Image (cartoon, rainbow, N blue to C red):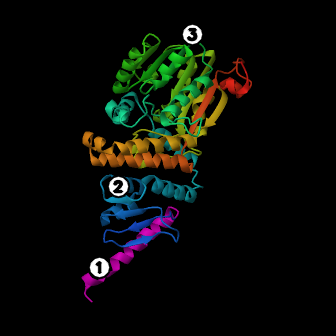
Amino acid sequence: MDTETSRSLAEPQFDRSLIRWFMRRIGNPRISVRLWNGDEFPVTDERPVACMEFRERRAMFEMLRSPSLGFGESYMQGLIEIHGDLLEFSNEVTAAMTTKRAAGYYGPKIRSLLYALNRNSLDRSQRNVYHHYDLGNDFYKLWLDEHMVYTCAYYDTPSATLAEAQVAKLDHVCRKLKLQPGQKVIEAGCGWGALAMHMAEHYGVDVIAYNRSKEQVAYARERAAARNLDGRVTFVEDDYRRIDERCDAFVSVGMLEHVGLANFRALGALIQRSLKPDGFGLIHSIGRSFPNRMDPWIVKHIFPGGHAPSLAEMMSVFEPQKFSILDVENLRPHYARTCEAWLRNFDSVADKVAEMYSEEFVRMWRLYLAGSSAGFESGTLQLYQVVFTPRGNNKVPWTRDYMYPEETGIH
């Protein structure tokens, strides 16, 4: 037998062994694997939920070299294909990896390194915003709800649609802040303005909302004018670090993930300067149950400069300023369902998105939305809402009944 023949016989066995070794490392998910030569085999004895196909041999080595980047970029380029439901595949693999790595709490030295690596300066923050949020309002209109809300929805009833759940989330935030007519509210990171307009329209408050995305601010101003709210809501195209007003309530929904760990204390100091002694604040953020770095593929392709903090890390916003924490709620299952709804909407307009951008862009966003839903479903990711007030404020509710008095008979 010549050398070339021996190599051709040995390679499939070698490739299978590499894949099986890798699958053990990530918890043996219930999937099958198909190699570029058509050879297919299950990872476990259980029925596979989907098949992962390597269309070229180099994709296997890219994934082995750097699992997150290698898999993500190979999928984007079509070198890896998923046969079956992408969300089911993502749920299965993420759940397996989460179970395998349950003991992965890292030490203070790495935590200190993360602080050093997450110094989002004003210029860097602007570039990060442009990368994700200035893709174009027309893109997001295709698959978000009618209110253009791009944060976790609140499914207060099992039958709620995405749009209904997003309105319920806006109201859930307002109720937690105990908003009263005539109050002044500062919002840091306002997206397309849905919360600011909801607060002004339904709670009679005046809102100053900050956002660095030119596209989003332009859209928000246009919508506010159409709803005759432009006298009650002011949208400021600037960084949250420029805030210099005093307010009765401070709210930030979906911005903390982009602030950078090194800037948490400064954010807390800004809130302390802004919030009146009897004011209330709420921060809504993607988080983790223990400190960890963001996924490398997500940081490179989706959210550069992003970090999902643990509750302990979030406390560096509140504790140095001696804020009193009033309420912490985790909406993790709601975000899994939200991302699933976004994925369904995105899939229904994938052809239009491909025309606007590219097929690789479509595959990147499908993987991002499916992976995000799986992250929340598995508990890899959390969604925290933290309500707080300055130390010494005794005008605080004694129970949570104030949030939904109509359900408790309180008037």
Residue on which disc 2 sits: 75
In the figure, residue 242 lies in which quadrant? top left
Residue on which disc 3 sits: 182
Q: Position of residue 284 (x, y in %)?
A: 55, 32
Q: Nearer the viewer, mark 1 or mark 2?
A: 2
Query: Could you give the CA–CA distance between mark 2 and mark 3, rounded to whole angstroms?
Result: 52 Å
Q: In percent of the image, x 34 and y 80: which residue is there?
A: 10
What amino acid is found at the position of numbered circle 2 in the picture?
Answer: Tyr
Q: Main secondary structure of the magenta part?
A: helix
Q: Nearer the viewer, mark 3 or mark 1?
A: 3
C-beta proximity under 8 Å, tags 3 and 1: no
Residue on which disc 1 sits: 8
What amino acid is found at the position of numbered circle 3 in the picture?
Answer: Gly
Against 258, residue 15 (above or below) is below
Regarding mark 3 in the picture, which secondary structure is present there?
Answer: loop
Against 97, residue 39 (above or below) is below
> Which label is found at residue 337?
none
Q: In percent of the image, x 57 and y 30: which residue is there?
A: 317
What is the quadrant of the C terminus in the image?
A: top right
Does the image show residue 84? yes
Q: Residue furthest bottom?
A: 1
User: Which residues fall within the magenta stretch?
Assistant: 1-27
Q: Nearer the viewer, residue 144 or 258?
A: 144
Mark 2 vs mark 3: which is more N-terminal?
2
Mark 1 vs mark 2: which is more N-terminal?
1
Query: Could you give the CA–CA distance between mark 1 and mark 2, rounded to whole angstroms?
Result: 26 Å
Does the image show residue 322? no
What amino acid is found at the position of numbered circle 1 in the picture?
Answer: Ser
C-beta proximity under 8 Å, tags 1 and 2: no
Against 339, residue 176 (above or below) is above
